[in-house]
Amino acid sequence: MVGAIDPDERSDWQAWRAAAARPAVDAELRALYTEVDAAIAQRGPTCWTSGKCCKFDSFGHRLYVTALEVAWFLGQIDSPADAHAAPPTPVAGGGIRLPQMAQTPGACPYQLDGRCSTHTVRPLGCRIFFCQAGTEDWQQDLYELFLTRLRAMHERHAVEYRYMDWIAGLEAAGR
Ligand code: SF4
């Protein structure tokens, strides 16, 4: 059951979404994701299980993100006319997909027919995680490095930092 909406929480999400729409924040986050993708490409991991890791309950893990990442992601979904990069594949039904809309219970609601429908705007954790054996060490190091930079970005732009479960964040932001 969804609880009552906390006005403070609503204003927190309004602030994060406004911050994510600021051109300087938008540009910095895009640049960081581009760097992440380049760092991953250099290491050349392979996706072996094609989307099973997005089914969090059955895979047995969670995805953690920052509030600013959730806010930025939702801004891209709401306004798919993206002047800087290929827009995400249109999401069926448009707009935010709440967790209860997931095709598989306990999975990311943006996984449609086994594929990520928002590949170009997915958060840091989605970009770095690979289940391929032998990649754990560099993944952890890379994740820590870029998460530290994300946190610094929040501080530089005077945006409150909060780290959260992806599903819980989507649920809270969508209320
Ligand atoms: S945003 Fe895409 S890659 Fe990330 S968990 Fe959802 S479906 Fe998977």
Image (cartoon, helix red, strand yellow):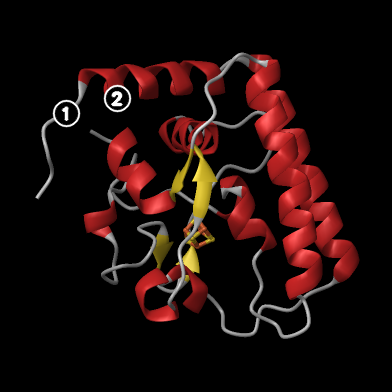
In front of the other: 40 or 149: 149
- Residue 130, labelled with which disc? none
Q: Position of residue 64 (x, y in %)?
A: 51, 52
Q: For the point 44% across and 79% down, which residue is it?
A: 59
Say which residue label 2 marks. 9
Label 1 beta carbon within 8 A of ligand 1: no
Q: For the point 67% across and 78% down, which residue is it?
A: 47
Say which residue label 1 marks. 5
Q: Position of residue 126 (x, y in %)?
A: 59, 58
Against 21, residue 113 (above or below) is below
Looking at the rendering, which quadrant does residue 134 occupy?
bottom right
Relative horizontal placement of residue 39, taking residue 99 as reference (left or right): right
Question: Which secondary structure lies at badge 1?
Answer: loop
Looking at the rendering, which quadrant does residue 138 occupy?
bottom right
| Type of amino acid under label 2 | Glu
Question: Which secondary structure lies at badge 2?
Answer: helix
CB atoms at circles 2 and 1 under 8 Å apart? yes
Relative horizontal placement of residue 160, taking residue 100 as reference (left or right): right
Relative horizontal placement of residue 133, taking residue 40 as reference (left or right): left
| Type of amino acid under label 1 | Ile
Count of numbered badges drawn on the protein: 2
Near mark 1 (Cα within 10 A), the count class, few <14, some 14-19 or many ≥20, is few
Image quarter (top left, top right, bottom left or bottom right) of the C terminus: top left
Q: For the point 47% across and 31% down, which residue is it?
A: 71
Q: Position of residue 7 (x, y in %)?
A: 22, 18
Q: For the point 68% across and 44% down, which residue is it?
A: 147
Against 106, residue 37 (above or below) is above
